[in-house]
Image (tube, grey):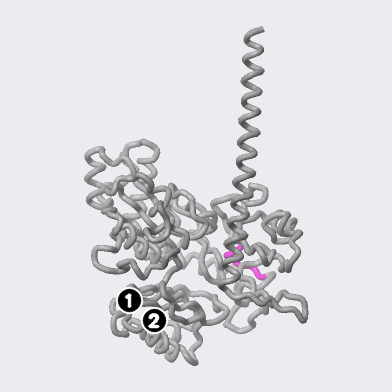
Amino acid sequence: MVNFYHLCRVADPEAETAAHREFCRGRDIRGRIYLSWQGINAQLSGTREDAHAYAEWVAGRPGFGGLAWRTERVPAHMFPRLTLKFRESLISMAGGTKHLPVGEEGYLPEHLEPGQWREMIRAARAVRAGAGLGDGVDLGALPAPVAERAGKSALDEIVVLDLRNDYEWDVGHFEGADRPRESRFSETPTESTDDLQVPAYMEGKDKDTPVMMYCTGGIRCDVYAAHLRTMGYRNVYALGGGVHRYFEEVGGDEWDGSLYVFDGRVAVPAERPEESERRWREGREGEVGSLEGHVPGRVNSCLAHGQTSPFRGLRAAAGCRVCGGEAEAPPINCANIDCNRIFLACPGCKQRLLGCCGRECVEAPRLRRPVQDAPGNYAKWNKYAPEGERINESRIGRRRRERRARKSREAAEAKREQREARKEMAAAAMRDSAGGGGGGA
């Protein structure tokens, strides 16, 4: 696996994209590679020779000097195909990002080293609890403005923003990071999309309040920092290299659960990669030795049905969406093709509801796919259609339908919560009335 992003001005991104396609032609590379006016974002798998050759070639392109990439050994391809294309924005955000000064001097966050970030997380937790930083935090590791305020006992708040999707938070997150209010990162407010303009957790916060941001690889933080900087926030910090780099250098300290990833593994344990690789090899000796043997309907052979994998049955931070009990990661997509919701479930509910997120989806009138009982992703939808039938729907159309379904679910859940709250209020009023009546007798 090779992952990297690089923010820079690309004069002709479509011509640059064509050059990348030509370089990758005939090489054993699969993954997602996006180029835009603002740089490149790439996650790919391939042979060591081809994957490293591509990263080195990109680093030598005009404007891409200083590009850094991370590698991780995996036993097979983590993607079904290569998608390499031009996009207006490197990451999806409502309103786009072309209007933002992404990557420009003065608009990036201050990147914290993993050890610094760990101390900041500890400091944020202590501040939230109303406790002094005391012996639990290394003040010398904190950024100067934060340490200075702490020394004056003027550090009364630190905001920790998880710039990922809500289901990623459910799989795992840093201690003290609240669940995103937005279901998808692409819904995170900007000045061009929402009267709120900042995430709900930052409403009413002073512009000098320390703001900590983190995401899986780092790109979302670098992009969203441009928005926060234009809004006037002065103390904006990000985890340099994202959670991936944090695990490489620190391991799972201050992390709850596992880590959601956008490849065939879906989730990985909160530990150093070499530990994951060691457990993989010990548990799979002799089972996987090449990139051959792709299993139809799955992303890659190493995660095929019935094979032992350290990337299944992982601990999740949140509970089962159905029963509230202990869930396991990786999460799954709802087997109802018209829902496709990503959710956590316990083994029992997963089987009882046939891989669906609720009874409504089990009884859905359209196609229901097989239960996702192993890590990996569903194949294209037509793989599961009855013979002779095709599902003709564009990616944009599908996402619009999924958004409508998600908003409908959220509205229904909000109504249920309101009903439960009214019932509880009525029950409390009856208890109070009974208690008052007894007191007057």
Q: Quadrant of the C terminus?
A: top right
The quarter of the picture where residue 113 lies is bottom left
Dot placed on the residue nearer the N-terminal end, 2 or 1: 2
For residue 286, say whether it is visible.
Answer: no
In the figure, is residue 24 to the left or right of 77?
Answer: left
Q: Which mark is residue 51?
A: none
**In the image, 166: left or right of 422?**
left
Q: In this rendering, would 228 be left or right of 390?
A: left
Q: Which residues are magenta?
A: 307-312
Q: Secondary structure at mark 1?
A: loop
Q: Which mark is residue 55?
A: 2
The residue that disc 1 covers is 67
308 in magenta: yes
Q: Residue at x 31, y 59 (%)?
A: 112
| Image coords of residue 359 (percent x, y) | 73, 54
The amino acid marked with disc number 1 is Leu
* Residue 52 counted in the magenta span: no
Disc 2 versus disc 1: distance between alpha carbons? 9 Å
Residue 432 is at least partly visible in this image = yes
Q: Residue at x 39, y 65 (%)?
A: 218
State the residue lying farthest toward the top: 441
Report the predominant secondary structure element of the magenta stretch: loop
Q: Toward the viewer: 239 or 272? A: 239
Return the x and y of residue 200 as percentages of the image width and height. 43, 49
Q: Contact (CB < 8 A) between labels 2 and 1?
A: yes
Would you call the spot at circle 2 few (<14 residues within 10 Å), some (14-19), or many (20 or more)? some
